[in-house]
Amino acid sequence: MASKVTEQALNLIKAMPRVALNNIKPLPYTAFKKKVNRQGNRKKKGRGDKGQGARGTWDPLGYEGGQHPLIDTSPRERYYAQYAVRRQYPPVSLLELQRLIDLNRVDVSRPIDITSICNTGLYSFHISKNHFGVNLTDEGCDQFAAKINLEVQWTSELVIAAIEKNGGTITTRYYDPPCLAALYDPLTFFKKGQPIPKCKVPPQDTLAYYSDPNFRGYLADPEKVLEAREKLAQKYGYKLPDLKDDPVKEMLLMRKDPLQIFYGLEPGWVVNLTEKCILKPKDEDYLRYYHTAY
């Protein structure tokens, strides 16, 4: 059974906010070694004449003297709540997106996704740092005036209202890391000769977000999305444009399949850049795997 001194030391370590090499001290009974003089007698045993060392009246464990307690000598660190494993979404504002459109860095005649934004060379993310796509922020929502079909990974209600006010559409979409690697640099991915991966189902903690019509999730019911568009227009006081007679209706309503990551390319296809052709599988087991969500 452990001694009382050991129990006190363990309780102190549990109560302290941080334990490092600079604030660990040995136990009191290990501070001195027994010394024997030449004659063999043990008089003072190396403890001197007077004081706490000679009498063994040590201070309580953790006491350092003065008015500065031990807990204040250690630097404090903020609590990040599993910051290293949380999904991160590098931000892009509406103001930056409008600037890319004005400079013709982004083609508004085609749907805009994470590949279109990364191809501008002005936005990048790192999968090794747990980045999972674009977070579209509301900075410059009053200056945004483009009609686009946009696909991002995270956004807010004000951003959705700013895009739909101009007659555009927006969808929030989840991609797993292998799909993000292919979307970030498609040319490098196609040169490897690998089949296009299928997109996996969102994790449990984000499934509700990507199934919510208020955030235009790609797994939401299309009818509920139309109802959410009308409610948001009433909330912010703008008239929702009619897409039925819009000349670019087909472009604005283009959507990817939940398993699809590239427009016009199916999962499992192999893009051959050397011969400039697409290799499509014919095996039934192969097709069943790339068209099943699991």
Image (cartoon, rainbow, N blue to C red):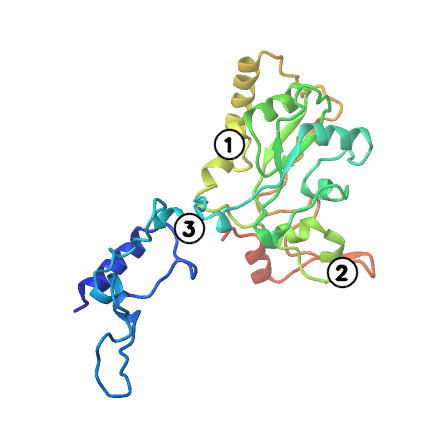
Q: Residues within 10 Å of mark 1 (few under 14, many from 20)?
A: few
Kind of residue indicated by mark 2: Lys
Residues 180 and 211: in front is: 180
The answer to whether residue 74 is left or right of residue 179 is left
Kindly state the secondary structure of the residue where label 2 is placed: helix
Residues 57 and 26: in front is: 57
Kindly state the secondary structure of the residue where label 3 is placed: loop
Q: Give coordinates of residue 157: x percent, y percent.
A: 55, 25
Residues 263 and 51: in front is: 51
Q: Which residue is mark 2?
A: 191
Q: Give coordinates of residue 155: x percent, y percent.
A: 57, 32
Residue at 72% of width from left, 44% of height from top?
118
- CB contact under 8 Å: marks 1 and 3: no
**Mark number displayed over residue 221:** 1
Q: Give coordinates of residue 251: x percent, y percent.
A: 72, 31
Q: Nearer the viewer, mark 3 or mark 2?
A: 3
Q: Is residue 24 visible?
A: yes
CA–CA distance between discs 1 and 3? Answer: 54 Å
